[in-house]
Image (tube, helix red, strand yellow):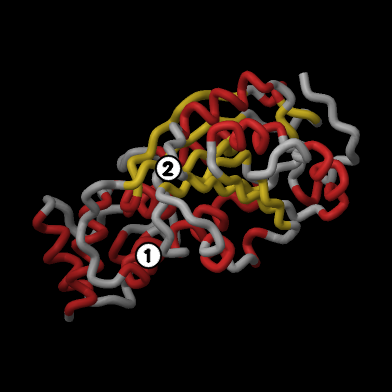
Amino acid sequence: MEKYDVKFKKKFGQNFLKDTYIVKKIVDVAQIECNSLVIEVGPGGAIMTRELAKVADNVLAYEIDEDLKDELSKRVGDFNNIFLIFQDFLKSDLCSDVAKFNYDNLYFVSNVPYYVTTPIILKLINSGLRFKKIVMMVQKEVGDRFSSPYGCREYGSISVLLQYFFDVRREFFVSRNEFVPVPNVDSVVISFSEKQEKLDVCDIEFFQKIVRDSFKYKRKNIKNNLKDYDLDIILNVLSKYGYDLSVRAEELDVKVFVDIANNLFQH
């Protein structure tokens, strides 16, 4: 079991893994190949950073808490392929940082701070970088939302966006007791593998906006949520799939949102 001589900060969502067995399982899920660069956010006590450095060519780790500088530097001192950036990942110039490395395969593997899970995944999606695989430990309820199929209560705008870009897989459950300090929630490990064949979208930003607007009010139907768009065009698309304007967003598959966005964008 890993021991940490640090003062944990709640504002940064610091809950460190204590068992290397769990960490090795997470790294195994990533299936890191040769000539690889792995990005990690929130290395904390470096328990996963070190395991990643054993199988990856280089690890680029972002840590927001500068008070961890001495502890982290000490913990990764035996590795020459770990590069620490003490900065808020969400404010980083990710593409510029990654451009400093030569690699064939790019990965993101992290026990992310739970309060910024969705902003982190959206930053990865919108970076334009091609990730071979993304592996994240997230709060169980968030993991359920990420991997939920359409027709389920947990299905939301983030489910649609992730499932457009990736094959999403719920890997395994992690008890809250595997962390120090013990958080109030259990966790799951989710993997995102790059889709080999994505549906064609006319404009990705417009598609994302349509998806967000469709789920704006969870209890309202498409007619109400998309009332500012051309409802005749939307109805024409929905009719192809056997729906009408009274349908709710959570009942629609990813391909329906793509079709709606493309038809609206072209008119």
Q: Which mark is residue 217?
A: none
Q: Residue at x 63, y 19 (%)?
A: 21
**Mark 1 or mark 2, which has the lower sequence index?**
2
- Residue holding disc 2: 133
Q: Looking at this view, is 58 or 63 the one in front?
A: 58
> Is residue 18 placed above or below 5 in the rendered structure?
above
Looking at the image, is 23 positioned above or below residue 168? Answer: above
Measure the alpha-carbon separation of dots 1 and 2. 21 Å
Q: Residue at x 66, y 38 (%)?
A: 49
Q: Residue furthest left?
A: 240
Image position, residue 217 (x, y; %): 44, 59
Estimate how packed mark 2 is, as few (under 14), some (14 to 19) or many (20 or more) residues with alpha carbons within 10 Å. Answer: many
Quadrant where the N terminus is found in the figure: top right
Residue at 46% in and 49% down: 106
Kind of residue sitting beneath label 1: Gln
| Nearer to the camera, 94 or 207 | 94
Q: Mark 1, residues whose alpha carbon is within 10 Å: few (<14), some, or many (≥20)? A: some
